Amino acid sequence: MSDLQRPALCCCRKAPVEGGPSPCPERCQRVDVASASNFHSFRLRHFHLDLRLDFAAKEMSGRQVLELVPLQAGVQTLVLDAHPSLLVHSIDCTVPGAAGSPDRCLSLTYRLDPFTDYGSSLIISLPAAVVRPRRTLQITVRYTTTDGPAIWWLDAGLTSGQTSPLVFTQGHSVCNRSFFPCFDTPAVKSTYSATVHVPEGVTVLMSSSHSAYSEQDRAFQFSMEFPVPAYLVALVAGDLQPADIGPSRVWAEPCILTSAVSKLGGSVERWLAVAEGLFGPYVWGRYDIVFLPPSFPVVAMENPCLTFIISSILESHEFLLIDVIHEIAHGWFGNAVTNATWEEMWLSEGLATYAQRRITTEAYEAFTCLETMFRLDALHRQMRLLGDTNPMSKLQVKCEPNPSSLMNLFTYEKGFCFVSYLSHLCGDIQSFDSFLRSYIQQFQFCSVVAEDLLNLFLGFFPQLKELDFDRWLNECGPPLYEPDLSAGAILTEPVQCLCELWGEEVPEPQAIASFDLSSWSTFQTVLFLDRLLDRSPLPQVMTHLSCCYSALLDGMNAEVQIRWLQIVVRNRFYPDLPRVRSFLHKHTSRMYTVPLYEDLCAGVMKCFAAEVFSQTQARMHPNLRRTLQQILFQSSTPPSETPLPLLPVTSPAPTPTPTDMPSTGCISLRNVNVSA
């Protein structure tokens, strides 16, 4: 959309504040049930990683050095979050010598205990002689890690270029404990540095503010000068090339670099400038983007200084733009100020979603309303499936069994509605902008809870002190307030009118012809298709829908195609089944394959799904292959760490014959485009 390019602003990137981050205010201890560590007993000042990447063995090996300050006397153990896939070889402690004496190195005893299905406890015994309150303690852990949940090794055939292997990490939300032993909680932030040794021809990137390369050692060196939580430490290594797009830079495999640059153009710097005008200086220095192969398990991840984005989204220009803006917003909400526990993830995602829409509203309000309506439609679809009393619909929700399950539409969209409600209470959006700038300034580089946000809000707007926000935070159900989206009527009304035409009977051809989907934006088209999907099956009109739209939609981007093909599957419309096959042969991204396989296996097309899977599984990452095998065979067993064997390639299955299709209410409806 050309209108989205409207702000012709130069980037006013500010330099970091002299003297570095200010300490967070003292507050009572918070409990993080997702961490086994005793992070309240120490202050983590800094840690360093020295790693060697072995692509043949698919291993990272090396050491981690932690600089810790005990906060109390009598601490006898250091407990770190770890994972069974992480093999510890040795742990030692550096003890400062007496005046004039050299430092001593003591070997420490340790054990690895079970904690949850997503991690373990690394329990390290500390000699009483080395633990002194407020005195820095240096712990060195030598270890090897392979294919834990944070680390994704891709053979050459699984990359975009299919010429060189690649590895990336994805720490959100509790996966980085399989990358390095850590206080794997958003409550703890520290600076870090890294040295990564690689084979010749491999480029390494990390989510850090500074980097350098030593030709002699074939090692990349990184440093992050501002404190970040463990989940925001990320690495990618492979055949990656850069292209400058202003002060920012795009990284990608050579085969997609040109496309990535052309799709982003100069938009990154424009949106950064708008964000800085609203929320204050961007403190992270660089804002680079790396595009990853379709195996990347989420759409995008806001790793500081280096946003990770799945390359599949390049097909969908509007979704790409929204995802980039969302990750830019995380530079303030989520990265600079972070939720202290995963049970309040809305403090990052709800605020980032609000900030994303505040940024786009500055350029094109109608488009923002359309995108918001599309997402709120998806939220209410989730509510219909789960019911108004489902505890997952709370903003303050218990992270059981795994915090990763909290990365859902309630965290994003109900959180967004709550922030919009706070803005509405102010009566003046500019006043709320000022509040958000103060929120960032006061809690920058800290981890907060809802109480911190709301206390500051009520201090800014004391006339609202009688209000009780507990219902928003702790009650189940849909949002208690939704913003006025009438400004988007120019874009949303045509969608609503066309949906109403496609009722139980075939509409008049002239009425249908007056709506030209080829001139619609992507978000208009996906909103229309989502609403048809809500009403499926549509036995009376499916043939006519296909005649009108199938060929047109087949030439559009993947976000459009996936929705049309779900309509095809849920309506058992066999003439368009070859399009489903072609789509699944082309796309091996989790966000596109999983929803289609779920729909195929919920109906009468399971044999067809198994056949297509057997033909395409060799090009899938083992994690996705395991997921789809569980869907195909309805396994309730947790995914194994060992990749399941490939299924034999079968001969083409016979075309299924229509029978009664089970209700789709049991399908775990997914939003197929969720950024972290």
Image: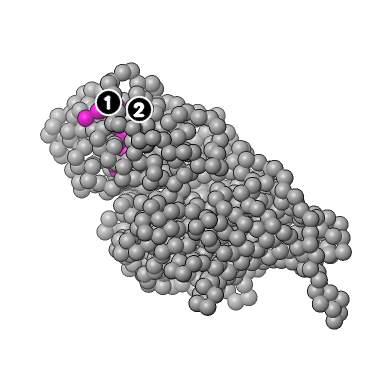
First to last magenta residue range: 560-575
- Residue at image point 17% right, 33% down: 547
Which residue type does callout 1 highlight?
Pro
Q: Does dot 2 land on a helix, a strand or a loop? A: helix
Judge from the rendering whether residue 416 lies leftward or rightward of residue 534; answer left or right: right
Q: Are marks 1 and 2 in contact (CB under 8 Å)?
A: yes
Q: Quadrant of the N terminus?
A: bottom left
Q: Is residue 65 visible?
A: yes
* Front-most of residues 259 and 92: 92
* Front-most of residues 8 and 530: 530
Magenta highlight: main SS: helix
* Residue 226: percent from left, percent from top: 60, 67
Disc number placed over residue 607 in the picture, else none: 2
Judge from the rendering whether residue 242 lies leftward or rightward of residue 581; answer left or right: right
Residue hosting label 1: 654
* Front-most of residues 73 and 524: 73
Please report whichever mark, 1 or 2, sits nearer to the chain's N-terminal start: 2
Determine whether 568 is above or below 233 in the image.
above
Q: Is residue 481 visible?
A: no
Which residue type does callout 2 highlight?
Cys
- Extreme residue in the bottom direction: 100
* Residue 499: percent from left, percent from top: 27, 33
Determine whether 608 is above or below 438 in the image.
above
- Residue at image point 67% right, 51% down: 81
